[in-house]
Amino acid sequence: WEYGSRVTKFNTAQGF
């Protein structure tokens, strides 16, 4: 899912 991928990428950038 594209949206999920974007969220995961954002969370990774935040350290989550």
Image (cartoon, helix red, strand yellow):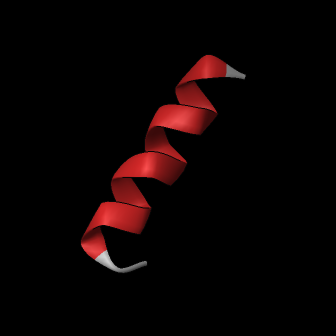
Q: In this view, does 9 lie to the left or right of 15?
A: right
- Residue 3, compared with residue 6, is above or below; it is above
From the viewer's perspective, tell me whether residue 14 is left or right of residue 9: left
Residue projecting furthest to the bottom: 15
8 shown above or below 16:
above
Which residue appears farthest toward the top when viewing the image?
2
| x 42%, y 65%: residue | 12
* 4 vs 13, nearest the viewer: 13
The residue located at (53%, 51%) in the rendering is 8
The x, y position of residue 14, in whole percent, is 27, 70
Mark count = 0
Q: Which quarter of the figure has residue 5?
A: top right
x, y percent for residue 4: 61, 35
For residue 7, side relative to residue 13 (left or right): right
Identify the image quadrant of residue 1.
top right
x, y (%) of residue 11? 40, 62
Looking at the figure, which quarter contains the C terminus? bottom left
Residue found 54% across the figure and 24% down from its top: 3
Question: Residue placed farthest to the right in the image?
Answer: 1
Q: Is residue 12 above or below residue 2?
A: below
